[in-house]
Amino acid sequence: MDSYIVKDGMPYCLDDFFTLHARTCHGCDTIITGSYIEAMSNYWHPDCFVCQKCRRPPEGNENIYELNALPFCLKCYHEVASSVNNGRSKSQNKVLRSTEITKHHTVVKS
Ligand SMILES: [Zn+2]
Ligand SMILES: [Zn+2]
């Protein structure tokens, strides 16, 4: 038994899991073959679910700000939003609290 991944309380070996649930990372557009994060209706490598500007992962209880379906930290969100929304009406932006962001699917090494 090598690594496995748990989904809905059921363990799957990696081969079966990724055959059944092939996911493309929304951050880098490659197939995910390990731990991943489910957030904002998309799937992400843990390393890719970071602020899309400064590449910093959210810390602790930090909120993530969604803009154009991409995650940003507060500081970058304000910078990007002010340039994106320049002179236009606000697009729908969503604040995601860290506690409701994600389901974290972790590969368990046995
Ligand atoms: Zn990725
Ligand atoms: Zn940032």
Image (spheres, grey):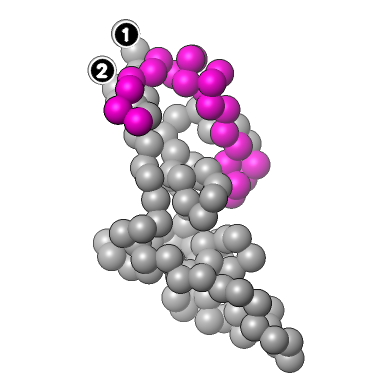
Q: Give the residue at the far front of this rendering.
A: 8
Range of residues picked out in magenta: 8-29
Dot 2 beta carbon under 8 Å from ligand 1 = no
Residue 4 lies within the magenta run: no
Residue 55 % position (x, y): 50, 60
Residue 29 % position (x, y): 65, 42
In this picture, residue 83 sits left or right of residue 46: right
- Quadrant in the rendering for residue 59: bottom left
Residue drawn where x is 32% and y is 8% of the image: 1
Q: Nearer the viewer, residue 89 or 29?
A: 89
In this picture, residue 44 sits left or right of residue 30: left
Q: Give the residue at the far bottom of this rendering.
A: 87
Kindly identify which residue carries mark 2.
110
Image quadrant where one finds the C terminus: top left
Kindly identify which residue carries mark 1.
1
Residue drawn where x is 60% and y is 47% of the image: 26
- Which three-letter amino acid code belongs to the residue tagged 1? Met
Check disc 2: other Cα within 10 Å, few if <14, some if 14-19, many if 20+. few
- Which three-letter amino acid code belongs to the residue tagged 2? Ser
